[in-house]
Amino acid sequence: MRDYIIVGSGLAGVAMAETLMSHGHSVVVFDNHSQKASMVAGGLYNPVVLKRLNLSWEGSRLMAFSIPFYRALEAKLGVDIDEKLRVMRLLATAKEQNDWFHAADQQGLSEFLVPRVEDNTNPCLEAPFGLGEVRHTGRVHTSRLLRAYRESLATAGGLREETFQHENLQVEKEGVSYQGLNARAVIFCEGFGLQQNPYFRYLPLNGTKGELLRIHAPDLKESRVIKSGVFLIPLGEDRYLAGATYSWQDKSPGPSEAAREELLSGLRKFLRCDFRVEGQQAGIRPTVPDRRPLVGGHPCLPNLYVLNGLGSRGVLIAPYAAYALYRYMEQEIPLPKAMDCGRFSKRYEKAGRHP
Ligand SMILES: Cc1cc2nc3c(=O)[nH]c(=O)nc-3n(C[C@H](O)[C@H](O)[C@H](O)COP(=O)(O)OP(=O)(O)OC[C@H]3O[C@@H](n4cnc5c(N)ncnc54)[C@H](O)[C@@H]3O)c2cc1C
């Protein structure tokens, strides 16, 4: 008997599994590789929404909690996961520069925005009003993390690379059973796959497709992340990730020509050197209309939980939300209201309370 079954080993599933195991619980994790958000993510973390120059939801708190979580995982897995990277906001107009100075003076933001603007010295960048730097930023190498974590789970006999079939789950008062496997509870961390989950699909997960290009730009010689209309993330050896798009209509899993064109046009606005596209990747972000995570228990059935809705900020939110769910399940500590999926219980009533 395992303590918990976890469905999904993206950022949510990994954070949940690690949180439980580090508190002495045993888990078995299912994954069928159907969703790719965590595998393709740029993995950037920064507590500031650079488009609007405001602090993201719980920005400082998430940074303080989640970055040490990844550092501990680095030590456990023996792989480099957290890369400190400077993130620079390219300032294309006088207004953007003024907005930067104004924001850097605001309480909360001043901790993260450097109140000076750097002149651009890279001839491959068009940045007439300089670049503003965000502090305490970096990148979690999500695909590397997932591969290493799945490998460590597999070695311990805790990974099943197969589809979890919801119809074969039996839910009882004392626990759950699934094809001969008994556990205290099951936690669904299925990303956009939640739409196939009969227990939790009443939740408003709409999903936003994102795509990234991998480019080769030998003359660019940039070691910082550059944020203009798109992000440019240095990968080393003259390679960069450029992205990401946001599509609310297209929910197809693969790369699209439209996204490629959109990203190329975004890049041409500020890149003044040649580059070649080497690859393109896509994933669906598990987004929620109110932009808050979906965490908690099923409205009626015992021993069923969900950890989802990480949106476009899975890196920072996953460890924090997983810990909140752990405390809720094991210590009966209420979930922070903003992430508690109980805020949608009326939708469950409306959907006919089934199953
Ligand atoms: C292009 C792009 C760029 C992004 N960039 C960033 C970024 O820079 N920084 C950041 O913080 N976030 C970023 N994000 C967002 C981030 O990727 C997501 O918030 C996060 O990955 C969601 O993680 P998840 O575990 O909830 O979902 P997923 O990563 O989708 O994982 C769900 C897992 O569940 C499995 N699964 C589902 N159903 C079943 C089933 N029935 N049986 C078995 N397995 C199942 C899937 O195979 C999958 O592995 C980006 C997303 C995209 C698409």
Image: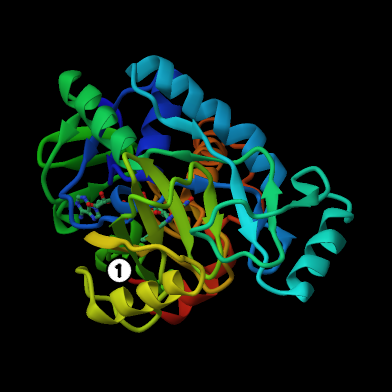
Residue 36 location, quadrant: bottom left
Neighbour tally class for label 1: few under 14, some 14-19, many 20 plus, Cα within 10 Å: some
Image position, residue 86 (x, y; %):
59, 41
| Position above or below: 236 against 155 | below
For disc 1, does the CB lie below 8 Å from ligand 1?
Answer: no
Out of 317 and 82, give the one closest to the viewer.
Answer: 82
**Point 44% across, 20% down: residue:** 22
**Point 40% across, 30% down: residue:** 81
**Point 78% across, 75% down: residue:** 95
| Position above or below: 337 against 350 | above
* Relative horizontal placement of residue 308, taking residue 148 as reference (left or right): right
Residue 252 location, quadrant: bottom left
Out of 47 and 128, give the one closest to the viewer.
Answer: 128
The amino acid type found where label 1 is placed reads Gln
Residue that badge 1 annotates = 195
Q: Secondary structure at mark 1?
A: helix
